[in-house]
């Protein structure tokens, strides 16, 4: 395995990204399709969705609890012709940690919530988090596993159509991409793209989208978060080659730890926040105290002048800070997940650490 390229962190213009996205939108509008190399197959007719209704937003507390051992959604996502995607341009290739904002600009910050789901389980939906964000009109970017989207299709339709939220890709089944090769890595990256585009097409086929929503809701996902925050040069290239920006973070709430109290999460957010920060937390039931922490942190951050925007809005407002490798707080620290969560778990008990 080649040693990871060592490059200094750098700040680059988001203009390249934006022009790439414009190009993508143009390609999508032209109806061009990307297949697995077998030519542009006719997309299958979309399954008609039941349209989201405000009456369905309420979430029972039990929905937060992951169902370990439930394999009902372990099947792979069906093949589907994907919308065309140009590879990410060189200045934005790498792991985006935060955004440098122009001097004197608004204090923008992006809250990201991961919706991780592994094989052999159905993860939770933390309704209290979304109830709070909707009540306070707080924007967020949701990095959803493809399998999570399929096991929570009604919730996914609600989140996709809500103007507060932007959907990102968090891998198919939360596999460590450092340990994958070939078709496995492709399926982990493209599975959620297929699920999102199918679900979005279902909303359109069900006439659930107003003309405004049809224009606003992204035709394809353009952001990716590595499961465990772990990558290597090959997987980083694979993500960027698929037209996805790799989004890490510069502010970790520590919320996957059951011992991280709401106060500790809130303090981490308030003390760590900088203009242009990207914050990582969870809304799949494994942010144990996240729903209690957000009402402590967000009013304080707003009082400090911070304004919550999506990651795409943050990128458009400044210059992305790109690192050559993926990490949490220091280079190499997420490599430990190679052994903490091996692809074929040992029969012994799983480690107590909870995946990001
Ligand atoms: Zn995750």
Image (cartoon, grey):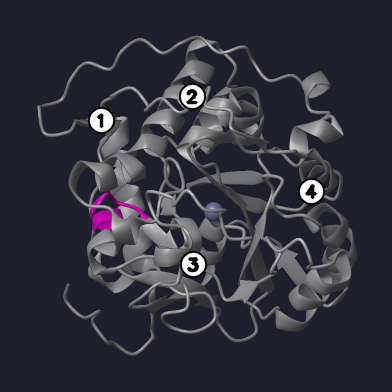
Compare marks 1 and 3 and give the one earlier in the sequence: 1
Q: x%, y% of residue 67?
A: 66, 33
Which residue is located at x 83 percent, y 41 percent?
131
Query: Few, some or many C-alpha atoms within 10 Å of disc 4 (few <14, some 14-19, many ≥20)?
Result: some
* 343, above or below 309, in the image: above
**Is there a contact, CB below 8 Å, between mark 4 and mark 1?**
no
Q: Nearer the viewer, mark 1 or mark 3?
A: 3
Circle 4 is placed at which residue position?
133
Residue 88 seen: no
Q: Which of marks 4 and 1 is in front?
A: 4
Mark 3: secondary structure? loop
Q: Do the residues labelled 1 and 2 touch (CB within 8 Å)?
A: no
Residue 144 location, quadrant? top right
Separation of residues labelled 2 and 4 (CA atoms) = 23 Å
Of the numbered discs 3 and 4, the one sitting upstream in the chain is: 4
What is the magenta range? 238-244
User: What is the quadrant of residue 101 in the picture?
Assistant: bottom right
**Residue at 10% in and 27% down:** 39
Numbered circle sitting on residue 19: none
Residue of label 1: 30
Q: Position of residue 280 (x, y in %)?
A: 62, 64
Q: Distance between the residues labelled 1 and 2?
A: 20 Å
Residue at 73% x, 66% y is 307
| Mark 4 C-beta to ligand 1 under 8 Å | no
Query: How far apart are the two marked residues, 1 and 3, measured between alpha carbons?
Result: 31 Å
Q: Which of marks 4 and 1 is nearer the N terminus?
A: 1
Residue in view at x 39 percent, y 70 percent: 95
């Amino acid at each position: 395995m080649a040693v990871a390229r060592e490059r200094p962190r750098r700040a680059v213009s988001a203009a390249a990204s934006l022009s790439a996205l414009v190009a993508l939108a143009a390609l999508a509008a032209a109806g061009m399709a990307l297949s697995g190399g077998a030519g542009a197959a006719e997309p299958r007719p979309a399954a008609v969705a039941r349209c989201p209704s405000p009456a369905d937003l309420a979430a029972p507390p039990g929905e937060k609890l992951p169902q370990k051992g439930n394999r009902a959604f372990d099947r792979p996502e069906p093949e589907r012709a994907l919308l065309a995607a140009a590879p990410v341009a060189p200045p934005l290739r790498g792991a985006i940690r935060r955004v440098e904002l122009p001097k004197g600009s608004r204090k923008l910050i992006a809250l990201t919530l991961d919706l991780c789901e592994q094989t052999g389980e159905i993860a939770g939906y933390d309704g209290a988090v979304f109830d709070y964000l909707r009540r306070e009109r707080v924007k967020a970017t949701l990095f959803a596993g493809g399998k999570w989207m399929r096991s929570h299709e009604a919730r996914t339709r609600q989140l996709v159509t809500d103007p507060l939220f932007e959907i990102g890709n968090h891998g198919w089944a939360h596999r460590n991409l450092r340990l994958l090769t070939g078709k496995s890595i492709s399926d982990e990256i493209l599975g959620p793209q297929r699920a999102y585009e199918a679900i979005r097409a279902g909303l359109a086929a069900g006439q659930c989208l107003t003309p405004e929503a049809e224009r606003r809701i992204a035709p394809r996902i353009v952001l990716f978060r590595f499961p465990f925050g772990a990558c290597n040069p090959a997987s980083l290239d694979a993500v960027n080659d698929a037209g996805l920006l790799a989004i890490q973070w510069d502010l970790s709430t520590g919320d996957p730890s059951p011992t991280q109290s709401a106060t500790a999460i809130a303090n981490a957010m308030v003390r760590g926040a900088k203009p242009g920060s990207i914050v990582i937390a969870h809304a799949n039931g494994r942010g144990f105290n996240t729903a209690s922490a957000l009402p402590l942190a967000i009013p304080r951050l707003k009082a400090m002048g911070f304004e919550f925007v999506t990651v795409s809005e943050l990128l458009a407002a400044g210059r992305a800070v790109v690192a050559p490798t993926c990490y949490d707080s220091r280079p190499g620290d997420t490599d430990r997940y190679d052994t903490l969560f091996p692809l074929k778990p040992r029969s012994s008990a799983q480690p107590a650490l909870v995946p990001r």
